[in-house]
Amino acid sequence: MNKRASKSIIVITLFIAAIMILATAKVYAAPNTTLPIPDISISLDNSNSPTQYVDSIKLLIMLTILTLLPSFIMMMTSFVRLVVVFGFLRSAIGTQQSPPNQVIIGLAIFITIFIMTPVYKELDKNAIQPYLNNKITQAQFVEQGSKPLRDFMLKQTRQKDLQLFTDAAKLDYKVTKDNAPLYVVVPSFIISELKTAFQIGFLLFIPFMVIDLVVASVLMSMGMFMLPPVMISLPFKLLLFVMVDGWYLLVKSLILSFS
């Protein structure tokens, strides 16, 4: 007890001394001191005509839109269907956070790159390379570049969904495969992809739901009311999924669904 008391007295003494030193210390601020903040300005240099000003503003707007470009691209590709189906698969098996979100998103991205490679090759051949070689204008680049994406999305879009947004847009011309505007095609494509993903998710749930029902019935017949059926059914779900080579069948079905 004496050693503890002496240690406590020493700690308190040091604490009080530190407070006194800090209280008596004076902090002197350097007068007329300014922080070295660099000058930041946005200017349109070497612009001598209205056309040059407009081109510079377009460039500024384009750089701003680039921050949202990944989201736009993902919504116009097969990524929507893939990531939703993989989420349904994890919920159907009941593994909660396995595989984790990073793995699901990464797998969906790489399969999306595989599926969209023919579209990119066509886009590169008809739009990107001619534009880089100054063979087409910027307007022609946008038109030629949007055509492969439009064809891909319309191939997966239900006519009913396309008609919904066409009527809502109140277009004064007949919408066809060649002249459908992207602001009509993209939302139609997304809701069609969501419906297709939900249909695939329903089919995924059926075999795993049967396993849950069988396990729950067996546990009730044995009088094990307090034992959660999920604890017993999860190993059987994993065993079923591995025995039928579930990842191979699922990924193969998803790739073929876009062909």
Image (cartoon, rainbow, N blue to C red):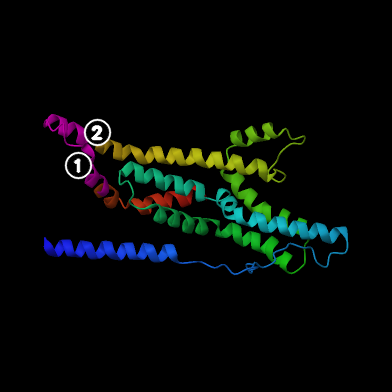
Residue at image point 36% right, 53% down: 100
Q: Which residue is drawn at 24% across and 49% down?
A: 239
Q: Residue at x 73, y 53 (%)?
A: 143
Instruction: Classify mark 2: helix, strand or loop.
Output: helix
Q: Tell me, for residue 213, which label it has, or none.
A: 2
User: For mark 1, does the 10 Å Cα neighbourhood hold few (<14), some (14 to 19), or many (20 or more) residues?
Assistant: some
Does 191 sit above or below residue 121? above
Q: Position of residue 124 (x, y in %)?
A: 65, 63
Question: Which picture quadrant has residue 85?
Answer: top left
Instruction: Give x and y (percent) for residue 87.
Output: 40, 45
- The location of residue 228, given as percent across then percent down, is 20, 37
What residue is shown with label 1? 232
Measured Cα–Cα span from mark 2 to mark 1? 11 Å
The answer to whether the residue labelled 2 contacts the one labelled 1, judged by CB atoms less than 8 Å apart, is no
How many residues crowd around disc 2 within 10 Å: few (fewer than 14), some, or many (20 or more)?
few
Callout 1 amino acid:
Ile
Residue 129, disc: none
**Number of disc labels:** 2
Residue nearer the viewer, 34 or 19: 19
Q: Main secondary structure of the magenta part?
A: helix
Q: Which of marks 2 and 1 is nearer the N terminus?
A: 2
Q: 6 or 246, which lies in front?
A: 6
Q: What stretch is highlighted in magenta?
A: 214-238
Task: Judge from the rendering whether residue 48 lies leftward or rightward of residue 171; answer left or right.
Answer: right
160 magenta-colored? no
Q: What element carries label 1?
A: helix
In the displayed structure image, the side of residue 25 where residue 68 appears, left or right: right
- Outermost residue on the right side: it is 49
Give the label, 2 or 1, closer to the camera.
Answer: 1
Q: Is residue 219 magenta?
A: yes
Q: What residue type is labelled 2?
A: Leu
